[in-house]
Amino acid sequence: MNPYHYYRQFKPFNLNGHSRVTESHSLVDELQKAINGEYSAIACYKKLADLAPTEEERLRILEIRKDEKRHFKVFSAIYTNLTGVEPSPILQEGCPDGYKRGLQFAFKDEQETVDFYHGIRDGVQDSYIKETFSRAAEDEQNHAVWFLYYIIKNQGRGYASRQGNYGAKGALAASTLTVPQMLVYAMQDEYLAQARYDRVIQKFGNVSTFMRIKEAELRHIAALQTLFQRYGIPLPQDQSQSYVTTPDSIKDAYGAGVQGEIDNISMYDTFLAYPLPEDAGFVFTQLRNASQNHLAAFERGLAR
């Protein structure tokens, strides 16, 4: 189902004078602020998309901009039905000219917006308004994850810029792949994951998310080792320590986790597009599905 189906199904509050929802002036003020923010984001993200260095990034930012347009539309409808007048959005200043600075600005703004929308949700009684801002907050958090991913990608932070042709980056850069090559890239990526988690745990202690996923990915290594043995392929040397760095903050660690899982999912989707032996296809499918679960866990950590 289209997650914005509920926007199209929205039936405005009856405007017969008695049915309009009564809310405090503070809600109207908050709605105006939210409308201004969405209006400004729409303008800023058009500018950011035009600056994007790749078509992939440009299209993703334009998709995010579409979300902001939907938010603007539904917030404006709520405002009009609460006040009886249409809002007059104000363009806020602050969108930087440079792409990298723009990404940083957008990430910070999206994170702050998540908290702001949660505050509105928690402060109203009307169930429709609650649901609207709850879903909008989920969108904004997803946007923040994408902006952080592009910050890491473009600033060369952490393991991503150093990974080169090792692990998932190598698999995704390859023009063709054999099953032995897939297994080598997959194992290299598991080595990288273990090295990243070890760095996080050494610096920040036994963070439960990283401990749990580290243990799960040890099982991934065991599953891959079975295939290496079955096909008579030598295990690759673990060179992962040369490709990872210690994150500056726990937020950076979650961000690197998000990027790592996005790469993993893309890698396994690439593998599964090939005709594979049944056992390899089964293992790759299981590892891809696990990466999707891990991505969700890292996204939740990033949202805290």
Image (tube, grey):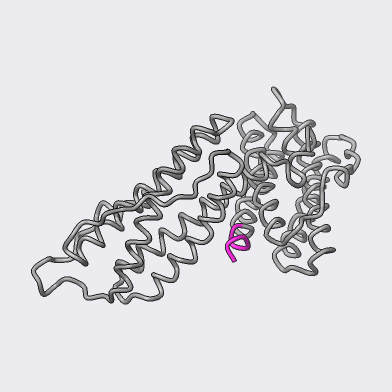
Residue depicted at x 83% and y 43%: 243
| Res 164 quadrant in image | top right
Residue 269 in view in this figure? yes
From what the image shows, is residue 206 above or below residue 170?
below
Q: Which residues are magenta?
A: 299-304
Residue 285 in view in this figure? no
Location of the C terminus by quadrant is bottom right
| Res 184 quadrant in image | top right
Q: Nearer the viewer, residue 123 or 240?
A: 123
Residue 276, image x, y percentages: 67, 32
Q: Number of labelled discs?
A: 0
Residue depicted at x 81% and y 51%: 222
From what the image shows, is residue 28 above or below residue 86?
below
Residue 229, image x, y percentages: 86, 41
Residue 253, image x, y percentages: 72, 57
**For the stretch drawn in magenta, what is the main secondary structure?**
helix
In this picture, residue 160 sits left or right of residue 111: right
